[in-house]
Amino acid sequence: MILAYHLTISCYGFWLPNDPRGAWSDFVRRYELLEYGNATTTDVRHSIAHTSHDRRQREEAKKALMYPPVRFTSDQAVCVVRGVMFRIERSEIPVYACAVMPDHVHLVLGRFRYSVEQMANLLKGAATQQLTREGLHPHLAYRSADGSMPSPWVSRFWAVYLDSPEDVRRAIQYDENNPIKAGMRRQRYTFVKPYID
C-alpha cells in the first residue's frame, strides 16, 4: 500500500529531455536542442542525478532552450515557499519534508484525497501565482501581450511511490539533507509535520 510520495518538481531547464544520464521524455520538442542528441528515456525509479556525465556539454545544450533555465534567487525561493505553504495549508495536504533548491523542489507528501498528479499541479500553480503576484516570476522579461508568461516549471514531475515506513523515512532524510549537500542551510517549515508510522 502506498504510504507517501517522494515528489520532485523541476524548474524549466533543470533536466533536459536528452540529458546524458537519462530523462523522463520520449522526444525532444525543440529543434535546436536535437543537436545534443535524441531523448534519453529512462524508467529507473532511483536517483540518477550523480551519474557521471559531460557537464560542459549539458550546460552548452541549455543555451538552445527557448528561455533561460530557471534558477531561483533567494527572494524567489522564499516566494515559492509562500505559495506552496498557502496551498498546503488551504488544502491540508500532509507534508513530511520539503526542500526548495535553486532549480527544483523536493517534497515528501502523505496520501491524500487528491492524486499525486493533482497535488503536484496545485503546488506548481500556487508557487507560480505567488511569484507573479510579487513580481518575482523568473520569466517576467518574456511576458506576452496578453500578460501570460512561460511556466518556471517543466510540465512533468518525478514521483516515487513509497510503500514502507523505511522508504518514507529515507525520502524524508534525503530531502532534509539535500540543501546541506548543496552548501545551503537546513530548511524548516511550519507546514512540514512529523511522519508517524
Image (cartoon, grey):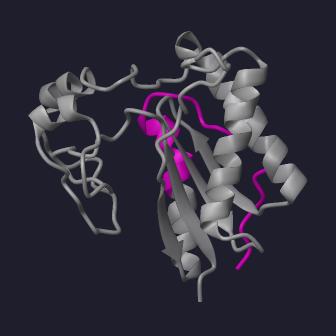
For the N terminus, give its image quadrant.
Answer: bottom right
For residue 25, side relative to residue 132 (left or right)? left
* Along the line of sight, the residue nearer the viewer: 194 or 99: 99
Identify the residue at horizontal 72%, vertical 14% (top origin): 135
Query: Which residue lies most toward the front here?
Result: 145
Rendering coords of residue 57 (x, y %): 13, 28
- Whether residue 140 is visible here, answered yes or no, is yes
On the image, which quarter does residue 52 sit in? top left
On the image, which quarter does residue 95 sit in? bottom right
Query: Which residue lies most toward the bottom here?
Result: 1
On the image, which quarter does residue 30 sit in? top left
Identify the residue at horizontal 39%, vertical 19% (top origin): 68
Identify the residue at horizontal 64%, vertical 38% (top origin): 187
In the rendered image, the vertical position of residue 2 relative to residue 47, given as above or below: below
Identify the residue at horizontal 63%, vertical 79% (top origin): 3
Rendering coords of residue 65 (x, y %): 31, 26
Rendering coords of residue 80 (x, y %): 68, 32
* Along the line of sight, the residue nearer the viewer: 24 or 46: 24
- Whether residue 189 is visible here, answered yes or no, is no
* Along the line of sight, the residue nearer the viewer: 76 or 189: 76
Q: Main secondary structure of the magenta part?
A: loop
For residue 177, side relative to residue 123 (left or right)? left
For the C terminus, give its image quadrant.
Answer: bottom right
* Along the line of sight, the residue nearer the viewer: 35 or 169: 35
Q: Which residues are magenta?
A: 174-197
Q: Is residue 185 magenta?
A: yes
